Image (cartoon, grey):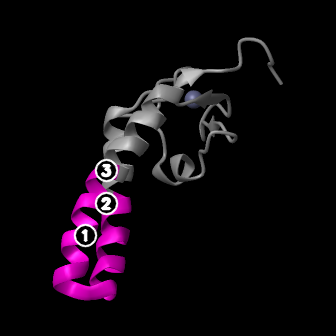
Amino acid sequence: MMKCPYCKHPAGLLRIAKVTNWTPYRCGFCHRRSQMPRWQGALLGGLSGGIGGAFGGIIIRHYGYLGWIGFLSLYAVAVFLVAWLLCTLYPIEDKDLE
Ligand SMILES: [Zn+2]
């Protein structure tokens, strides 16, 4: 599971939801910043896009667009949980300490 690389506190789900390529993760306990490795983000995006696209086609055929929207929201939560369980954070404050 994602942990703060400084204080080893488990990362908060709401805080991870705000992390993007341009916005680093900020620990709620020690308030230091860390980032998800770029390759993990790319891998996750590629895999989730591929699997989501494949399932999306099947679901639209059987349940229509409303079913697809429902599937997408559930799927986004699932991808997010997988990211939280499998991805790691690395410290980015070696050079620019506040
Ligand atoms: Zn911390």
Q: Examine the rendering and report whether any part of residue 10 can be seen.
A: no
Q: Quadrant of ligand 1?
A: top right
Quadrant showing the N terminus: top left
Residue bearing the label numbered 2: 53
Give the residue displayed 52% in from the left and 21% down from the top: 5
Residue 57 locus on image (x, y percent):
25, 70
Q: Residue furthest top?
A: 94
Work out whether mark 1 precedes mark 3 in sequence or the reverse, and give the earlier one.
3
- Examine the residues drawn in magenta and state their main secondary structure: helix
The amino acid type found where label 3 is placed reads: Gly
Magenta includes 36? no
Packing grade of label 1 (10 A; few <14, some 14-19, many >=20) is few
> Do labels 1 and 2 touch, CB within 8 Å?
yes
Q: Is residue 92 left or right of residue 55?
A: right
Cα gap from disc 1 to disc 3, whole angstroms: 11 Å
Residue bearing the label numbered 1: 57
User: Relative to 63, is 28 above or below?
Assistant: above
Front residue of this view, candidates 83 and 55? 55
The residues colored magenta run 50-77
Residue 90 locus on image (x, y percent):
54, 21
Q: Is residue 48 left or right of residue 38?
A: left
Cα gap from disc 3 to disc 2, whole angstroms: 5 Å
Packing grade of label 2 (10 A; few <14, some 14-19, many >=20) is few
> Do labels 3 and 2 touch, CB within 8 Å?
yes
Residue bearing the label numbered 3: 50
Q: Does dot 2 land on a helix, a strand or a loop?
A: helix
Cα gap from disc 1 to disc 2, whole angstroms: 6 Å
User: Relative to 92, is 57 above or below?
Assistant: below
Residue 80 locus on image (x, y percent):
39, 51
